[in-house]
Amino acid sequence: MFKTTVKINGMMCQNCEAHMTEAFKKNFKTKSVTSSHDDCESVIISVETPDTEALKKVVEETGYEFVSAQTEPYEKKFSLFGKK
């Protein structure tokens, strides 16, 4: 599993977050996506590493400015009392 953090300029509200989250879910095989206009980023959890150029294309087609993307290995964290 991989965690990709995509930095995005132009998201101004929760509707912007929803647009980016849906665009990533539609165009990539994701396990989860969260977007934050406050942090100017979307975080994608996926089985495969997303292609940076494809990420850039989706961001720009959705109407925002792609800044960068960083991917790192991701391990689901568990506690004795369930998922964290």
Image (cartoon, rainbow, N blue to C red):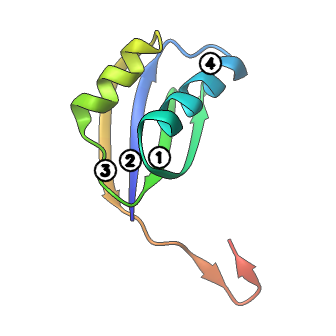
Q: CA distance from mark 4 to mark 1?
A: 16 Å
Identify residue for label 4.
16
Label 2: few (<14), some (14–19) or many (≥20) C-alpha neighbours in 10 Å: many
In the picture, measured across the screen, residue 28 lies left or right of residue 51, that is: right
Amino acid, disc 1:
Ile
Real-space CA distance between mark 3 and mark 1, rounded to the nearest whole angstrom: 9 Å
Name the foreground residue: 54 vs 42: 54
| Distance CA(mark 3)–CA(mark 2) | 4 Å
Measure the alpha-carbon separation of dots 2 and 1.
Answer: 5 Å
Q: Which residue sits furthest right?
A: 81
Query: Three-letter amino acid code at disc 4?
Result: Cys
Height in image: 22 above or below 19? Answer: below
Give the distance between the C-alpha atoms of the residues marked 4 and 2, in whole angstroms.
19 Å
Inspect the image, locate mark 2, and give the three-letter code of the amino acid beneath it.
Answer: Thr
Mark 3 or 4, nearer chain start: 4
Mark earlier in primary sequence (3, 1): 1
Residue bearing mark 2: 4
Kind of element beneath mark 4: helix
Labels 3 and 2: the sequence-earlier one: 2
Task: Note whether 74 is above or below 37 in the view shown.
Answer: below
Q: For the point 62% across and 26% down, which residue is it? A: 17
Label 3 SS: strand
**Which dot marks residue 71?**
3
Q: Which residue is mark 1?
A: 44
Q: Position of residue 36 (x, y in %)?
A: 60, 32
Identify the image quadrant of residue 55. top left
Considering only order in the chain, which callout, 2 or 4, is on the residue closer to the N terminus? 2
